[in-house]
Image (cartoon, rainbow, N blue to C red):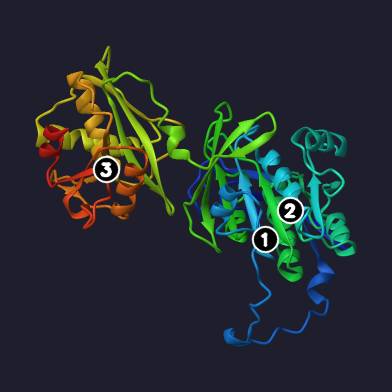
Amino acid sequence: MVKQRIIYACTQCGASTRQWRGQCPDCGAWNSFEEGVEATVGARSRAPTAPPGRPVAASSVDLASDTRIETHSTELDRVLGGGLVAGAVVLVGGEPGIGKSTLLLQVLGRLAGDVAGVLYVTGEESIRQVALRAKRLGVAEDRVQLLAETRVESILEVLGREPPRVVVIDSIQTMFTDVLQSAPGSVAQVRESAARLVRHAKDHAVSVLLVGHVTKDGALAGPRVLEHMVDTVLYFESEADRRFRVIRAVKNRFGAANEIGIFAMTGKGLREVRNPSAIFLARGSGDVAGSVVTVAREGSRPLLVEIQALVDEASGPPRRLTVGIDQGRLNMLLAVLHRHAGISTQGLDVYANVVGGVRIGETSADLAILAAVRSTLSTRPVDRGLMVYGEVGLAGEIRPVPGGEERVREAAKHGFSKALVPIANVPRRTPGGIEVVGVERVERALDLI
């Protein structure tokens, strides 16, 4: 006999209670509890269970047959850590229209020639709609199997009858299971549906790619536990109206986290960008104040990006706005600029931007940000052949950052003639064609720039 009860689940962390609460006691979110119906099977607790498994030594596990499945996309394979892993579950999130379904359909089309069995399960579109998009993208339509289904039990039945190697579920928020009576997309349904698909992937060595919706804040919709259940979490970071798409691995059990892949949206789908530094440095021919080039390290890749700053008189309270840079970091750097370099931005609006939609999460861009602010204040352009990087401390010192030699080589490869770096990052062997200058203090660095 099936017994039902009303529960309230937190949309942020998945915690559930019998009564509605204004604040979640687990994650502290306000007004995050939603009503749902949970079904429990009374006879299930009395049913016989399978015998427990036996522990085995790690050395006895056969790893010879575990090989990566290459997606034939250099950028995506880089983000995944070398390709798909059998039995791995990948969660792909991003804003509507940014290219999640397009990318995964292209991946299945490339894999169809190498892998025996690929399946695209759609819960949002009809089979006809997916087939039309596949034809537009040039995907091998006869090799990719399509299934329009939202019931998890039916999907698992199809997977057991015709086991594929790679499965795409688009999207996890549309799936539901008969065990629960709540609506698809609720916290309980998303958690239980994902758990069943993850278990099937582990038991049958099937690579599963889940499409996840995001909230207005940019976080994946549904319970936070969803990101803990999967092996890899990929985020589209760019805006949907931009031509270039940046995919970042925020979690990866089989590779490096924070690795990024760069794609360009075209009429034939997403095309990988082999040399992103050249794309983000497509500047005009004239010299302008407030523009400085730095080298950010995203995962294992050095990436040349342009930092822009604009300082103007404030018509009201001074504003500090950033795009691609932490706003709190900018406020701290402006205080260092005033205290140690004698340059004040009091009563002025300060805007900082990373060109191309890239978000810099490390501190190596500190010196470039200050150089751009100084340049726009003095209306004197920075030399186009200069590259700047370095972390700025509160005492005004220039601190070293990881991968200094790789950053210098990347700048030399793209024709830069001079690099201003922390003195501890000066390489022993300087690449040909570039002069490296080491600095210890922020005031000295700004004078040289």
Chain-order first, disc 1 or disc 3? 1
Residue extending farthest front: 432
- Percent from the top left, x then y, of residue 6? 73, 50
Query: Residue at the top extreme?
Result: 315
Residue 234 seen in render: yes
Q: CA distance from mark 2 to mark 3?
A: 42 Å
The amino acid sitting under disc 3 is Gly
- Amino acid at pointer 1: Ile
Write down the residue under mark 1.
69
Q: Nearer the viewer, mark 1 or mark 3?
A: 3
At a point 58% along the width and 84% down the height, the residue shown is 58
> Percent from the top left, x then y, of residue 10?
60, 48
Which residue is at 64% across, 37% downward? 270
| Residue 153 picture location, percent across and down | 85, 57
The label on residue 368 is: none
Up the image or down, 330 lies above or below 439; here it is: above
> Image quadrant for the C terminus?
top left
Q: Residue at x 51, y 55 (%)?
A: 26
Image side of residue 341 versus residue 68, left or right = left
Label pair 2/1, CB-CB below 8 angstroms = yes
Among the 4 quarters of the image, the one containing residue 347: top left
Q: Position of residue 273 (x, y in %)?
A: 54, 40
Marks 3 and 1: in contact by CB < 8 Å? no
Residue that badge 2 annotates = 111
Judged from the image, the secondary structure of the residue bearing numbered disc 3 is loop
Separation of marks 2 and 1 at Cα, in angstroms: 8 Å
Callout 3 crowding tier (Cα within 10 Å): few <14, some 14–19, many ≥20: few
Q: Which residue is mark 3?
A: 433
Instruction: State the separation of the CA atoms marked 1 and 3.
Output: 40 Å
Q: Tell me if mark 2 has few (under 14), some (14-19) or many (20+) residues whose alpha carbon lies within 10 angstroms of its own.
A: many
Q: Earlier in the sequence, mark 2 or mark 3?
A: 2
